[in-house]
Amino acid sequence: MTAKEFLSQYANTAAEITTLTEQIRAQRELAENITVGFENDGGAPGTRRTDKLEAIVSNIVDLENELTERSVQLAAVQKDVYHVICEVKDSRLRTLLTMRYMGGKPFNVIAETMRNTSGEQYSEHHVAHRMHDRALTEVQKILGKI
């Protein structure tokens, strides 16, 4: 696994959690909009048709179980990624990695933040290419030791 793949695990798992959360919300909205009424559909008069609602509720339960599993996985991935980032010796590279892979920040925001906090001139290009490449190289070395 490359350094970038390792570091990206956190954002990928977080994105899956966001998607699952959105699916659960959509299913709940759908369930709220279903009215269980009485229909004469050829069966016994007054038979409740709850099969749609039951299917949606079952789907919500399945999605919530998956969300719980992914949340546990995210916590483990977050811990692993954070520990590897903490092993990077250069604090500027640690800042870049943390903001990029744990905070999901784009390179222009990282460069601006680093300029504002250090007073040094960091261009987006410098952060995105030179520093990021060095940071990934450092992470790859750390992963090679694990």
Image (cartoon, rainbow, N blue to C red):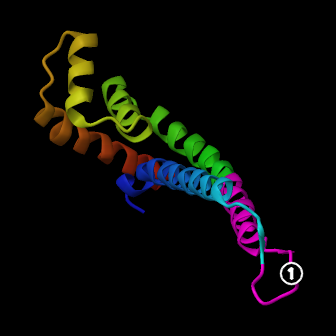
Where is residue 51, by image quadrant? bottom right
On screen, residue 139 above or below 44:
above
On screen, residue 134 above or below 119:
below
Q: Looking at the figure, which quarter contains the N terminus?
A: bottom left
| Magenta stretch: includes residue 56 | yes
- Decide which of 37, 128 is in the foreground and name it: 37
x, y percentage for residue 92? 31, 25
The residue carrying mark 1 is 45
Residue at x 86%, y 81% (from the top left corner): 45
**Region rendered in magenta:** 40-69
Amino acid identity at mark 1:
Pro
x, y percentage for residue 39? 76, 75
Number of numbered markers? 1
- Decide which of 45, 91 is in the foreground and name it: 45
On screen, residue 13 above or below 46:
above
Q: State the SS at label 1.
A: loop
- Decide which of 82, 68 is in the foreground and name it: 68
On screen, residue 28 above or below 116:
below
Where is residue 79, by image quadrant? top right
Q: Is residue 128 left or right of residue 138?
A: left
| Magenta stretch: includes residue 19 | no
Where is residue 114, by image quadrant? top left
